[in-house]
């Protein structure tokens, strides 16, 4: 046996990029991407991705393997194509949230050392402002994204158009295979921080395992019709950008998500699957024009613990909701609420409660535990004893880009990745998240650092102390509630003034919905603000 060593014929590095070639052969004439008047087949998508990759690695753009290429755009066909095309050129793919403000965006571009940015035309002014903050020798090239019909030349601020880049490419390009499956493939930022961005780096291996995991765990069938309500910039759409390609899905792209659009697209295209944050489910169930679906639509929800009532109400409309849990650091979902047939006979409310649990580790993932933060031992599986959620498996990131200290804090010498999230284990081995990391608020699926918002509040000359906590919200899951104590002022500062001040410093979704003034914020004997008391106060607010 000791003579049977690895051989090039059995040691090809794992990568999802080869899935596109297979799908073009199997489902070449089947629709791949649909968006308004744009429609492509899988053969066309394969060719377009190769063309983009070819031009990226050519002398005209000169993107070298390992360099970062960023994408700022919504769920449109070009953004989907770039999930394959960028890494096919050997570059590292970096999706950026287009909802960030220019300052936050410039921080990410500089931190990532991005060499080229594909920019949706709606984000044109945002990116130009962000780039203007960078030193001239650090400014990336810009390529404007269009809808596939406009092949006119770009304006003076842009190197080219997306279609122009594609037309110059070679449809027979031999895409660049990774020399090792541990080679970095994607760089995703956990939030739009303006001080210490956390850039999560994933390898070809972790992306491949995430994709296979997605197919197995959700039992995604061949040729489903998948509606893109989940932003692709959120951890590459939880990995479903590549999973839908593997099964020859019809991807229905949507630039802006609203309830009427979703219902209309479901009817028009006979949608079978979609991923959505709990806030999207709440939007659908609470919309005045909500309607019973003609046929069931399977939905995977994650991003924040969904209320059982939302899952139950979505079910009455015909949405078959599954639930999972993961982080940017795990590419996609690594825990899901695997459904047991015996639960079908339970009352609807009981079923919804079970579905609201995050669940058990997925098929391709190694281990998921809840550990006591002091003893380091696994907590009792009683559904009550809380601890920190820890992971071990091939989907865990390579580490945080340019942040060895942050990497060491979360990926410890005991061989576990520490999520910072608090949870319990139930007697059946199913995990339930009880609280998120103390500095993170999840509003509409967006991870928001409370300390970042607090740092902005402290720049207001009237503010003495500030603490931001999550306030439960039926629509958004959580909204931001700021508790503020003020310095002595001749004229009292109003809640509106504080909010307007934040709007000048932060993206809209990071502006506190509520501002509560207190003479002094509650503190421990050592002077630490007691946020758990503020969270309880926030729950009672209208």
Image (spheres, helix red, strand yellow):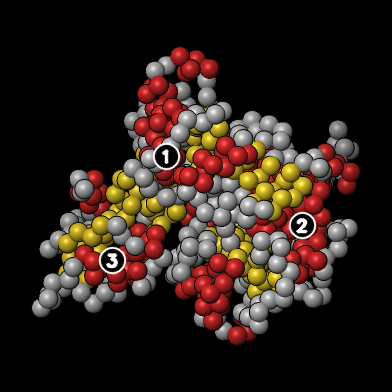
Classify residue 131 by image quadrant. bottom right
Q: Secondary structure at mark 2?
A: helix
Q: Earlier in the sequence, mark 1 or mark 3?
A: 1
Could you tell me which residue is drawn at 63 percent across and 80 percent down? 157
Q: Quick one: 112 or 80, which is closer to the camera?
A: 80
> Label 2 neighbourhood size at 10 Å, few (<14), some (14-19), many (20+)?
many
Q: Secondary structure at mark 3?
A: helix
Side (left or right) of 182 relative to 173:
left
Q: Earlier in the sequence, mark 1 or mark 2?
A: 2
Q: Quadrant of the N terminus?
A: top right
The label on residue 49 is 2
Confirm or deny contact between disc 2 and disc 3 (CB under 8 A).
Answer: no
> Label 1 neighbourhood size at 10 Å, few (<14), some (14-19), many (20+)?
few
Q: Earlier in the sequence, mark 2 or mark 3?
A: 2
Q: Position of residue 459 (x, y in %)?
A: 29, 74
Q: Secondary structure at mark 1?
A: loop
Q: Position of residue 239 (x, y in %)?
A: 62, 46
Disc 1/disc 2 C-alpha distance (Å): 39 Å
Of all residues, the one furthest to the bottom in this rendering is 136
Could you tell me which residue is drawn at 12 percent across and 63 percent down? 519
Q: Is residue 508 visible?
A: yes
The label on residue 22 is none
């Amino acid at each position: 046996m000791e003579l049977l060593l690895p051989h090039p014929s059995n040691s090809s590095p794992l990568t999802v990029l080869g899935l596109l070639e297979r799908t073009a052969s199997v489902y070449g004439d089947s629709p791949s991407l649909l968006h308004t008047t744009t429609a492509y087949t899988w053969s066309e998508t394969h060719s377009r991705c190769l063309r983009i990759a070819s031009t990226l690695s050519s002398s005209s753009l000169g993107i070298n393997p390992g360099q970062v290429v960023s994408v700022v755009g919504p769920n449109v066909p070009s953004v989907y194509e770039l999930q394959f095309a960028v890494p096919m050129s050997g570059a590292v793919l970096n999706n950026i949230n287009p909802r960030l403000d220019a300052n936050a965006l410039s921080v990410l571009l500089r931190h990532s050392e991005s060499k080229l940015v594909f920019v949706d035309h709606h984000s044109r002014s945002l990116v130009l402002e962000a780039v203007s903050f960078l030193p001239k020798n650090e400014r990336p090239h810009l390529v404007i994204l269009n809808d596939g019909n406009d092949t006119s030349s770009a304006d003076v601020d842009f190197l080219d158009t997306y279609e122009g880049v594609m037309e110059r490419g070679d449809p027979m390009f031999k895409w660049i295979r990774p020399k090792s499956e541990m080679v970095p493939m994607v760089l995703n930022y956990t939030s739009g921080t303006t001080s210490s961005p956390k850039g999560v780096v994933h390898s070809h291996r972790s992306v491949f395992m995430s994709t296979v995991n997605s197919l197995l765990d959700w039992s995604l069938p061949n040729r489903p019709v998948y509606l893109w309500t989940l932003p692709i910039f959120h951890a590459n759409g939880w990995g479903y950008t590549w999973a839908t390609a593997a099964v020859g899905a019809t991807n229905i792209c949507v630039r802006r998500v609203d309830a009427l659009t979703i219902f209309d697209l479901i009817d028009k295209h006979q949608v079978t699957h979609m991923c959505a944050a709990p806030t999207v489910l709440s939007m659908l169930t609470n919309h005045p024009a909500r309607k019973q679906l003609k046929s069931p639509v399977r939905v995977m929800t994650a991003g924040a613990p969904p209320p059982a009532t939302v899952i139950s109400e979505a079910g009455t409309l015909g949405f078959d909701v599954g639930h999972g849990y993961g982080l940017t650091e795990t590419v996609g979902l690594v825990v899901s609420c695997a459904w047991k047939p015996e639960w079908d006979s339970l009352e609807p409310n009981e079923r919804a409660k079970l579905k609201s649990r995050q669940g058990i580790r997925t098929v391709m993932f190694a281990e998921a535990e809840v550990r006591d933060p002091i003893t380091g031992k696994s907590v009792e599986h009683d559904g009550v004893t809380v601890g920190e959620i820890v992971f071990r498996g091939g989907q865990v990131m390579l580490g945080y880009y340019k942040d060895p200290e942050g990497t060491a804090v979360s990926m410890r010498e005991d061989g576990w990745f520490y999520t910072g999230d608090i949870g319990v284990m139930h007697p059946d081995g199913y995990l339930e998240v009880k609280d998120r990391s103390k500095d993170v608020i999840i509003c509409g699926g967006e991870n928001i650092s409370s300390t970042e918002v607090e740092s902005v509040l402290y720049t207001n000359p009237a503010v003495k102390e500030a603490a931001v906590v999550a306030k439960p919200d039926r629509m958004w899951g959580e909204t931001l509630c700021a508790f503020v104590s003020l310095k002595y002022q001749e004229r009292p500062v109003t809640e509106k003034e504080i909010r307007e001040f934040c709007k000048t410093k932060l993206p809209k979704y990071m502006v506190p919905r509520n501002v509560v003034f207190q003479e002094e914020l509650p503190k421990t004997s050592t002077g630490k603000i007691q946020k758990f008391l503020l969270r309880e106060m926030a729950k009672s607010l209208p």
